[in-house]
Amino acid sequence: MDRVRAAAPQLAGLAPYDPKYVPADAVMSANENPLDVGEDVRRDIERAIRKVSLNRYPDPLANELRDMIAEANGLERDWVLVGNGGDELLFDTALAWGGPGRTFLNLPPTFSVYAANARLTNTAVVDVPRGGAPDFAIDEEAVLAAVGGEGVAGGASGAGAVGGPVDFTIIASPNNPTGLRASQEFMQRLLSATDALVVADEAYFEFSRMTSRPLLEANRNLVLLRTFSKAFSLAGVRLGYILAHPDVIEEYLKVRQPYSVDAVSQAIGRVVYESRAKFEPGIRSIIEERDRVTEALKVIPGVRPYPSDSNWVLFSVEDAAEAWEHLYGRGILVRDFSNAPLLEGTLRVTIGTPGQNDAFLSALRDFCLRKRD
């Protein structure tokens, strides 16, 4: 038959997630670590992979890796769940806490996948926008008001959504793409104000040096989401994990895909996590370069960098789309948010190696000075 039944109605008008990756000499668009794993760690990885029985299914729960993560965080295994990158765990959150008649509280501008996952699961999405410049801070009182009432007035979207009691929210800390972390004071106020699930997306927490881990045991509604992709240079492997109360982990287990973390990824994850102290010098270097790049951006005419606790800097620039083209013409790929709602006129640059950062700054300076002439 030369036709096919329409896809599910919630897909209508939903654009696929597009990281806008194109080849470049300096890829500074995806918040990846500019440094690959070291040769000594790579050798250990190769030895570990050789021991993997490829004809056998992997441990469905990656229990050896769970144990390592649990011990490092002073927890038992049942407080940890490993996933196929943080992305799987984010989708599992929407599957377990979303659905028809349920509500997700979103804090835009933030990672677009949060709201997309909610809409895919027919969950109402209610937006409480962040403030704008100079720092895109969370509107803390508005968020607390939204979760504290019996319903959410206005701002709802999604299939059949009218806005009801908030069932879950995700607080990116640091927030992607704007850069700042959420304060611990706000996180505790939020957790105390609601029984909704509160996911602290800490994918970049190693660069902020701050975590909501101290709040975990006393707040059953808190989930910490972390990844191996950024600080541990494993974006190509797809490993993430959550820390949460065992009762919450049990709900995630009901919706997760079986065998979602393959045996090779588990082996790599064990080696890297055991060697995580070796990544610390690289993390410190990225933090130092972030601060250097921020200060350099401040003196380029027409450029305004926003404060960041992560491994990137969001900045506004005159004729941002044209600036992106100029940078790409010089072999430098940054992320273009110039037409994104609440982010108009901005670009985001991931902190690279010192040489990549210098090339980026030089190219952007040339563009801005030429526009002034």
Image (cartoon, grey):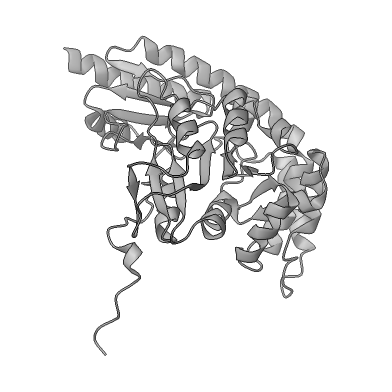
Residue lying farthest to the top in this orientation: 299
Is the residue 313 above or below the residue 334 in the image?
A: above
Q: Quick check: 301 above or below 254? A: above
Residue visible at 36% across and 56% down? 16
Report the number of numbered marks.
Answer: 0
Q: Position of residue 199 (x, y in %)?
A: 58, 43
Residue 38 horizontal/vertical position (percent): 69, 39
At x 47%, y 39%, the residue is 149
Image quarter in which the C terminus is found: top left
Which residue is at the front of the view, 366 or 237? 237
In the visual, does 275 lie left or right of 373?
right
**Quadrant of the rendered image containing residue 70:** top right
Q: Residue furthest bottom?
A: 1
Residue nearer the viewer, 188 or 84? 188
Q: Quadrant of residue 146?
A: top left
Asked if residue 106 is positioned above or below residue 338 in the image, the reply reads below
In the image, residue 13 lies at what x, y percent? 27, 58
Query: Quick one: quadrant of the N terminus?
Result: bottom left
Q: Is residue 103 left or right of residue 79?
A: left
Q: Residue furthest left?
A: 373
Q: Residue at x 58, y 42 (%)?
A: 198
Q: Left or right: 276 with respect to 86?
A: right
Asked if residue 45 shows in the view, the reply is no
- Horizontal and vertical percent for residue 214? 73, 31
Front-most of residues 224 and 344 = 224
Residue 109 seen in render? yes
The residue lying toward the viewer, choosing from 144 and 301, is 144
